[in-house]
Image: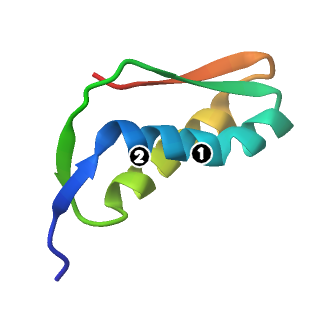
Amino acid sequence: ATRPEAVDLDAVVAERAAVWAAFADEQHVGIAVSGTTAARVWAVPGALDQIIDNLLSNALRASPPRTTVTLAVA
């Protein structure tokens, strides 16, 4: 079993948005990040990345060209 560890939420969201930017550009969709928390959350290593990747994958699949997907951190 993998144990949760403290993860910088803002850093993970920004990193995943940057990774997905090229895929979004291919579909003429923007990715924006709004808000900050300066929070650390407890997560199993890689789990938060996977959750955000799934959200972005689904959002990009459903977004028409010339729109923007926003990841809001609150």
Quadrant hosting residue 38:
top left
Rendering colour mode: rainbow
Where does residue 59 sit, x and y in percent of width and height? 58, 34
State whether residue 65 is above or below residue 20: above
Residue 40: numbered disc: none
Residue holding disc 2: 12
Secondary structure at badge 2 equals: helix
Residue at horizontal 62 percent and vertical 41 percent from the top: 18
Q: Position of residue 4 (x, y in %)?
A: 16, 65
Left/right placement of residue 33 relative to residue 19 reads left
Mark 2–mark 1 distance (CA, rounded to whole Å): 16 Å
From the viewer's perspective, tell me whether residue 62 is left or right of residue 33: right
Image quarter (top left, top right, bottom left or bottom right) of the C terminus: top left
Q: Residue at x 80, y 22 (%)?
A: 65
Residue density around tag 2, few if under 14, some if 14–19, many if 20 or more, within 10 Å: some
Say which quarter of the image contains residue 31. top right
Left/right placement of residue 19 relative to residue 35 reads right
Q: Residue furthest front?
A: 38
Q: Earlier in the sequence, mark 2 or mark 1?
A: 2
Residue behind mark 1:
57
Q: Helix or strand or loop: what does disc 1 sit on? A: helix
Vertically, is 51 above or below 47?
above
**Amino acid at the residue labelled 1:** Ser
Observer-side mark, 2 or 1, equals: 2
24 relative to 7 in the view: left or right? right
Relative height, residue 29 to residue 53 (above, below)? above
- The N terminus, quarter of image: bottom left
**Residue appearing at x 19%, y 78% in the figure:** 2
